[in-house]
Amino acid sequence: MRILCSAVLVFLACSGGNKSDNVIRFWQFWSDMNTKPVIEQIAAEFEAENPGVKIEITDLTWANGHDKLVISFAANDPPDIMELGSDWVAEFSSNGLLAELESDLPENYLYPAVWENKLYGLPWLLDSRLLYFNLDLLEKAGAEFPSSWAELESACEKINRLDADLFGFGCNSAEKHRLYKKYLPFLWSNGGRILNDEGNESELDSREAIEALEYYLGLCDCGVIESQRRLEEYFREGKIGFVISGGWLLRRLRANPPEFKYRLATFITPRGDTGRSFFGGEYIAVHSKSDKIDLARKFAEFLTTKVNSQRLCDAAGFGFPPYLDLEISDPQKAIQARQLSYSMAAPPTPLWNDIEMDIEDALEAALYDHGTPEEIFKKMSETITEKLRSAGHANKK
Amino acid sequence: MRTRNKILLFTTPWIVYLLVFWFYPICYSFYLSLTEYHLLTGASQFIGFDNYSKLFGDPVFITALKNTFIFVFGTIPVTTILALVLALFIAEKIPGHRIFQAAYFIPSITAMVVVALIFYNLYSRDGYIFTLCRMVGLSPPVNGFLQSESTALLSIMAMDIWVAIGYYVLIFLAGIKSIPVELYDAARVDGAGFIRRSLNVTIPLLKSTFAFVIVLNTIRSFQVFVEIFVMTSGRPFNSTLTAVYFIFDKGIARGDIGYASAAAYLLFMIILIFSLIQFRLTGVRRNS
Amino acid sequence: MSNSLSKWLLFAFLVVILFSTLFPMIYMIVLSFQNPGSFSVDLSNLSFTIKNYMTVFKSNNFGRYFFNSIFVAVVVTVGNMLLCAMVGYGLSRGPNKITWPIFLTAVAMLMIPLHVLILPIFQMMLKLGWFDTYMALIAPWLVSPLGVFLMKQYIDGLPVDLEDAARIDGAGEVSIFFKIVMPLCKPALAVLAVQIFLTTWNSFLFPKILTNSSEMYTLPVGLALMQDPRSSDWPVTMAGSTVAALPVIIFFLIFQKRITEGITAGAVKQ
């Protein structure tokens, strides 16, 4: 029996992770060879400024990071400080799992991390989705550069007709955390919203929302449905007229210049004004019950200084620090920055993870013709409203 | 007699294991299924049989069950018949039969994750299977096999048959080898050819092997998960959603442990009933 | 004459199946050597680079996954060999009235897939504090119903005389088990080892759910998570797949006979 017990102890000791006083556990999503070293270096600088402190970095992936974080809280073993997707902050903060933070960054960048008037996350790197056009295909199809929804759709159809292996638009297949981000810009550009001001009712059954969906489906009809990764590959191979992507696609296009001319453009409203897009943000949050909470807060602030955020963006090759006074000389990046200033995030609600899946299920149903867009969205909207009501949450301002 | 009782102590590991890892989870699972339990916060509340009534009204769960049944009843006959035919062929001592036997077996010792990744690539638009279909004049779904509702589940089933066959070939071969040679000789003297010999002698004598193959395959197929996790996540539009994936998705990804436990418990009962029916039908009995 | 013709037809048929069986594996290996970023094997433009393997081991903690997979599989296999032999011995030699119902529980458990018990086991591991440790990966698998079944059946067939003789010489039960029974069980133990090792090495759902940090991932779990559009590409994924699959295939080709016996052991005993 004693042998068994000590064996158990040895195992636990082997795998329980280092929990000594001066170690801060930091979970983040950057594991590629360009960015990881920069993050390690920033951590090392923090360690140098705070003698005795050790930062332990763990990598997450977007595919499983959310589940891993949830499970770590359930297992009562969460990190002291973590990077969160902007739309996750409310879920964790509303359950009292995150520590309150302070910041004087621009309010519209802080907005996704605010819950009941308190701030729970610091923006680190922001990036919005925008449109990438293949100018050669546009020209070949005899289409002008589109300046309204109608022109965009007709350009899509024209390109799609060129050849069986060429497509107008790159439409996302139902990938978790990706599909809804492609629809939201059309929703917002059309003047629609996801939730009402109180955050207790879905507005996805509105005329604007359904119109945007119908328009989006129209684009998919003259496009190819694939995973984001394949869509980007197709675009780089010159097979797709336009795709929606983030700043990382520009980095790849520059690293391996394609044989065609391309152009970045912001989303447009139906009439052609600058449209609203989705901004994805990476936020830094601190665990509320961490025993190194002050140190973790300090590290969170250190990570998100203008200089350090910029270093991350430079290494990643995309994204912008959460500051307004950025000097951008690169014209393509300037378009991205412009789109970012016109972008919105998902409304902060603890149920977002669930709502997001409902929206994606509905988009998928519409994409695969399981009912009319109106029916599908009305039903989904009802489901969401019901969930919000029964949870009794409202983001009191 | 006292020694015999002492020897009984040797069974302790199994007793402990049975209580801790089977009996307790089976009971606890039932308890969980009667609660509303949220993973993130750990808040739990007893709600009786609400989860079960909710399940029966949940079209997604019904779809998951339906797909699981399609998967089970679609793959098993094909796998069994193909494996039997191949085993009969190989048993004819064709030149190189050892190589065939070994090669057919390789997919089933390869991790399902690996197989699923390879086939994900092959099935995609512009993947090899896609291109091959085009070359022979078929028109595969524009977006690849896994993105189309009508082909996604079938494609995964085809892959699963591909994986499983070699394993069952082996089992059939073992069964064939245990048939007394005299029976074959008698049939040969009567001038029976390969087909008649197989139909009249081999196959009837493989009854218990059949039973084994089918029971094993049923249990395995009811649990199909990895393929779905890697290749489709149950998509498109739940057309590849299976019961175990449903449990995983609701329980772990959405954190609704109580609801997922109810689904798990139902699946547990279904498998139990099926195994019992199969044991009855196939007449497998253990002689002590 | 028609006989030899049909033999050739048969042969051709088997070769076709052989090709379709091996093709995906070969495809995996070839794709793993293509230039990073390629989607599939372009036969007109083949390349050969080992970069992908370097990427796999550098950026993915792959060495650790590999170690975990081996460590867990070995411990579980050895544990099963010892414990299942013990239980099998107890069931075979103990008083029949008691051992028979116990044996039946093992047979019943053979039929229930543990998959339906993931949530309670997950909860149990959280509460025990074993979640995300080697304990979670190992403890639930140390005594398999299959092993109990196999070992009991095998030991039933061993003669009791040797044990009785040792008992008369005054040997204790434990030393009888280790010195007499275990050595005689070697063939059955080999069979069991192969089965357990393969199942453990390839298992996915439980390691996926019972671990949370990449230090604890096994190869299949690590592999399945490599499909991140921002950071990975196919040749790298295939390089990782090859690393996970090849050792088992080579192992199989070397010990083919033993393994074949191991897999079929359960079937012929009926």
Image (spheres, coloured by chain):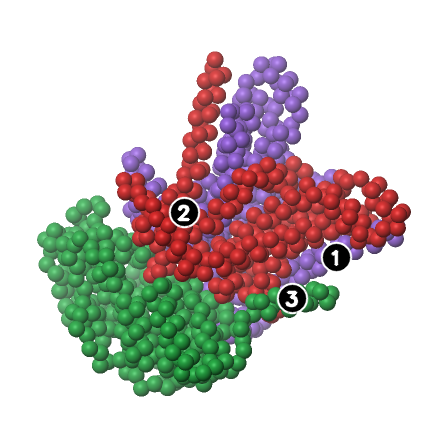
**In the depicted structure, whether residue A281 falls above or below residue C240:** below
In whole angstroms, how far apart are the C-alphas of marks 3 and 1? 19 Å
Given contact means CB atoms under 8 Å apart, are the residues at marks 3 and 1 in contact? no
What type is the residue that disc 2 sits on?
Ile
Give the letter of the chain under mark 2.
B
Number of the label disc, if any, that sits on residue B118: 2
Hey, what amino acid is under mark 3? Val
Where residue A107 sits in the image (x, y, percent)? 29, 83
Q: Which residue is mark 3?
A: A8
* Callout 3 secondary element: helix
Give the residue drawn at x 65%, y 52%. C78
Tell me where residue A291 appears, x and y as whole percent.
51, 82
Q: Which residue is mark 1?
A: B12
Mark 1 lies on a secondary structure that is: helix
- Distance from disc 1 to disc 2, alpha carbons, whole Å, reads 43 Å
Question: Looking at the picture, does residue A314 appear above or below residue B207?
Answer: below
Q: Is residue B140 left or right of residue B37?
A: left
Front in this rendered view, residue A112 or A304: A304
Q: Which chain is purple?
A: B
Of the residues under marks 1 and 2, which one precedes in the sequence? Answer: 1
Residue A312 screen position, x and y as percent: 32, 72
| C226 on left or right of A104 | right
